Every structure is written in structure tokens, then in C-alpha cells.
Image (cartoon, grey):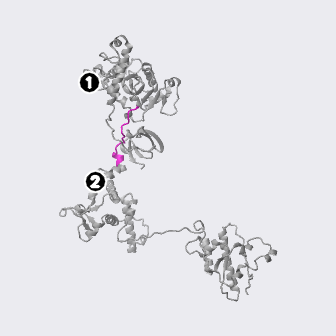
Amino acid sequence: MVDIGFVMGKSKLAPQSDPTIPRLELCAAVLAVEMAELIQDELDLKLDSTKYYTDSKVVLGYIYNESKRFYVYVHNRVQRIRHSTNPEQWNYVRTEDNPADLASRSVPASHLTQTMWFSGPSFLRKLSNQSEPFQSFSLVSPESDVEVRPDVKSYVTHLHGKGLSIQRFERFSTFQSLQRAVALLIHVARSFKYPNTMDKCKGWHHCDLPRSPDELSQAREVIIRAVQRNTFEKEFKALEKSKPVPLNSCLRNLNPVLQNDLICLGGRLKNAEVGVELKNPVILPKGHHVSMLLVRHHHAQVKHQGRHLTEGAVRAAGLWILGGKRLINSTLYKCVTCRRLRGRMQEQQMADLPPERLKVCPPFTYVGLDVFGPWYIATRRTRGAQPDAKRWAMLFCCMSSRAVHIEVIASMDTSSCINALRRFFAIRGPAKQLRSDCGTNFIGACRELGMNTNQPDMTVQRYLYQHGCSWVFNPPHASHMGGSWERLIGVARRILDSMLLKHGTRLTHEVLCTLMAEVAAIMNARPLVPVSNDPEDPFILTPSMLLTQKVGVPPPPGDFTDRDLLTKQWRQVQALSNMFWTRWRQVYLSTLQSRKKWTLSHQNLQEGDVVLLKDNQAARNCWPLAIVTKAFPGEDGRVRKVELKTTDQGHSKVYLRPVTELVLLLSKE
């Protein structure tokens, strides 16, 4: 007969630290173990077996666990349980069959006699005559359990053979840093082998003392030996057996020999009275990271000079790099310091002509303008007045017909620029678009006149708004973008120089205006295309043909009859205009087809590139560094102007510059 009775019970309140339910269940299991030990100590009888029951499968997983590690709180309590019990003693009981669950709830004392608090669960009587089947429990959701430590994986690499692994060499950007790191390893290895050499250097330690020349020299040999053994494995095996290298080896023509466990060049200089470094230089593979670091190192030692000096420094150091010339050229091309000192300005393929150059439209519809000069003129000699004054000239160029108009201005200020524009508009009519550089007088005139520009925040005046005139500014320092009028300024200067040689340099305002008018007439009479010797082609295509509607010979027959040309002047004028534009299309446009320079397409600058900004007022080594903040691609997708950001005395500045004023130092890619 089996009797089940109540011996002892205990319950505790949950602490105010608000622990989790699994922790409270685990504390209850620890309390059960402590109570069982107390009962066994107080009884005079020896118990045959002890079983523990809990309704928490999480706690059972903790107790049965053999693979996972827990954090301190759970680890200590699980150790306490397993110190006094075995996992096989722990079993699962349903919550409704667990008497201890009553202690965690509010059950009146008068009702306890009606519960299983004193009698225990009924399944105990069924298991009294038979053994309970063993059941193992695993962790419940170990991936999401906060009490379970994550797995820490350790990888073990088995090295076969001797030598230093070169996988980490690519993490070094200079040969000096790689050499110092290997020298430190050599120093630490020696401290293990000879621990009594220095009191501070024993065993594994971080040594702040400078490395000795012997350690640095040994580190250099260790690095080169590791590179050779990794690259020339077959050659090493053959040379160690005193056999020739394989026929397909890249060292076949160099007659390699083995010296101090290094592959050196054999060559034909055995009897030369030179040092070992020149007689038997150490061979290094081409394209290897260490070879590139050595080239950089010796290139810096010769103060970033050219290829010949760098190659001489490499050979003098006792190194023979396969494909060394190509590696040296590649290293020097990528050297940032060399780019700062001698790098070429950026270039881009010459852009297509803008539509304004190719449109058939009235003269001076699309205009490019610029100012040139000055010249000194004589003024009236009055008391307090200056005997001489300066004068400039503003040149207006028709973008399509290449006609020229010149106005003389008294100063370079905004007022003179506006007056010249008003005279030009009064004579030639309003223009749809003006193009110029970013001269301060042009910027000021554009603001005063309220014209639409590519500059922000411009006030628009009513009378120029009605004309629909806009002003486009080229980037600063981009004179080549205004080549159509810059070229004509050079022609005007040469004509004016010959005139001043004849009339003398003593000018008045009236004489200068007359000379400028004659210069414009000569330039407008220049041929736009080479003059033909064909008698069937007597006409010379000039801008004045369109401006004055006058030619030196009668027009050829065409769609207009002789009677029309003689009797109706307006038809003659129309015939001359049609003849100009016909030849302009057939002959002149073909001369603009080819690109005289900048024929190749280059890589575009992009946002994030580091560049060197050209400064004509400073030496090249004082040019500022800048970073590209914005690129402006053209219609063909090629970038010819960018926005830059640089710093000057702690203040950042933003500039708009053409790519021809920049040297690329570091690309974003």
C-alpha cells in the first residue's frame, strides 16, 4: 500500500526587479532542491530515490542542456541544481496537476482540504508500482532565448611547410609599414627564444622601442622570401635540388640561382668588379603587391622624379622586378604627388557646335561679345584734366554669319557696357541671345538691364523682356568656350596694329572710332571659305555680302531673271541674300565639320573626385586642392565644366570651372 502525504511546502514573493517568468521558475526549482536537501538531513531514514517535478519546459531545457552556454544568472542556478541532482531526476508535470501552483495563487486556507495540496496529484498513485519512462528535454527556442549565449565559432588553420603567409601583405599601403610590422614579429619571436636579452622585452608584448637596422634588414629578406616561395614554388623546388628551372618558367632566361634561400639573377656578370646587389639582384614577380610597394618606396626616395631615376634606385637596391618598366610607369602614373607636380590638365573631346552657329537667321540674332584694349588717346588739355585717357573696344560677333560690329567704350564699368549695348541694338537691331565670359562689367550690365541669364536672382525689366533677349555666361577661365569671338579679337588686333604703325600711336577719340569702323569693315570683307580659282565661281563669300547686299560682280542667273535684277532692287537684294545662305550651307558649314584638336574622349569627372585647381597667380605646388561637388554633362553626355568646393583659411568656397583648369588627383572610383 502506497501513502502520499504532505511534508513541507514553501513559497516566495517575486522580487521588485521584475524578473522574467523563466527566471522565477528556475528559482523555484532551486528552492525545491534546497528543501529536499533539508528534509534529507532532518530524516533519520535513507531515501532510495528522489524525483523532482516542474511545469516549466524552459527550466527542464536548462537542466538537461549539454551544448549551449548561459549568461551568469541562469548559469549559476543551473549549476546549483546539477550539483545536487541529476537531470534524469527531473520530470514534467502539467500545471493543473502541480500542487505548487496553488501556492502561487490566492487559495483560502479553508479550501485547501478540497485541493491536492495535502494529497498530491493522482498520477503519483498510478506510477507507484511501475517505473516512470525516461524523457529528455531540449531548450525551447534557443535562438530567441535571451538567457542563451550566442555561439562563438573559432576557425583553425593548419599550415604546412615553413614561411610567412602573404595574405595580409595587401593590407599595407607602404613598404615601410609592412617592414616594421614584420620586424616587430621577428623581435617578439626573438624575445621568446632569448628572454633574458632585455628586461622589458619578454614573451608576447607590444614593444614601442625603435627597430634595429638588423631587424629591418632581416624583415626585408623575410618578406621577399615569402613572396618568392608563394610565386615561384616550382622554381624553388628545382633550385633546392640543384636542377634547372622548368622550361615554361618565366625565369628561364635569367639563369636564376639560390643565395641565402632567395632566388637571385644569375646573369653573365660573375666576374664583374661590382657589388652583389648589381651582380645578383633578387628577383621579384611582376604585378605583385609587394613589388608595387617597393617601387613606391624607391620612387619616394628619389623625391618623385621620373622613370629613369626610379628604375635606377630599384636596381641599386638589388632588386630585379619582372616587367619592371611597365610597373614603374603604372606606379608613377597613379602617384598623387607626381600628379600634383607634373600632372596634365583634364581634357575632353571638343563639343558639337551650338545650334546658334548653324541656324539661318538675320545677322546678329545670336551674338558673342568681348572687350579688348586699352589704347591711350589724347584729350583736351584743360586745367586739372588728364592729358591722356584710356579707351577700350567691345566686339560683337554674329554667331552664324561671322559678321563683326565694334563699339568704342570709355571705361570697363557697367555704365559704358550698357551704353555700348544700346548703340549696338540701335544699329543692328535687338538680339535673341548674348554670349560672353564672366567679366564683372558684363555681369553688372546684365543685372542693370534685367536680362534673362544663367545667373540666379536677376530682376527683369519690361522693355528687354519684350525683346526676349537672354545672356549666357561661359564658366570663368574658359576662354576656349568663346573661341568664335576670341579668334576675331586676335584678327582685329593685327589689323589695328598695322594701322597704328602707319598713322602713329598718338590717337584721339574720333580717330580711334574711325579706325575701329575701318577694322570692322575689313573683317566683314574677309572670305569665310578659301577663295576659288574657278571662273564659274566668281563670288567671294563674306559677311559684308549679307550686311550690305553689295558684291563686286553681277549675281549669276538663277531663279531670278536679269530683268528682275535690273529693275526691281528688292529682288536683287533678295537674290544676294539667298545666294549668301546657299553658299553658306554648301561651302562654309563643311569647313566646320572636323575637330582640329581635342579629338579623343576622356573619362568624365564626377561628384566626389579630388582635383588640383589651377591658379595663375601662384606656383604649381601652391595650387589649392578641391573636390567636385557637381558635374554638368553636355548633350553628348561628356562633362566639360564642374562645380568645385575648396577651402581658403578655414572658409569654404564654391567655384565653377572648366575641366581644362583642373588636374585629377584621386578618382571617386
Q: Amino acid at mark 1?
A: Ser
**Does the magenta run of residues contain 322?**
no
| Left or right placement of residue 112 versus residue 612 in this view | right
Return the residue nearer the eye: 41 or 385.
41
Q: Position of residue 17 (x, y in %)?
A: 68, 66
| Residue pictured at 29% horizontal, 53% vertical | 326
First-in-chain label (2 vs 1): 2
- Name the residue tied to disc 2: 325
Return the residue nearer the eye: 602 or 576.
576
* Secondary structure at numbered mark 2: helix
Q: Single out the residue that lies furthest toward the top.
A: 567
Q: Which mark is residue 532?
A: 1
* Secondary structure at numbered mark 1: loop
Q: Could you say which quadrant of the image residue 437 lies in?
A: top left
Return the residue nearer the eye: 242 or 212.
242
Q: Position of residue 557 (x, y in %)?
A: 31, 17
Disc 2 and disc 1 in contact, CB within 8 angstroms:
no
130 lies above or below 73: below
| Left or right placement of residue 73 versus residue 357 in this view | right
* Quadrant, the N terminus: bottom right
One can see residue 507 in this view = no
In the image, the segment drawn in magenta is 338-354
Return the residue nearer the eye: 463 or 494.
463
| Residue pictured at 27% horizontal, 20% vertical | 538
90 lies above or below 325: below
Q: Position of residue 576 (x, y in %)?
A: 35, 18
Q: Which mark is residue 430?
A: none
What secondary structure is the stretch in magenta mostly built from? Answer: loop
Q: Position of residue 478 (x, y in %)?
A: 39, 35
Q: Could you say which quadrant of the image residue 19 lies in?
A: bottom right
**Does the magenta run of residues contain 347?**
yes
Q: Amino acid at mark 2?
A: Lys
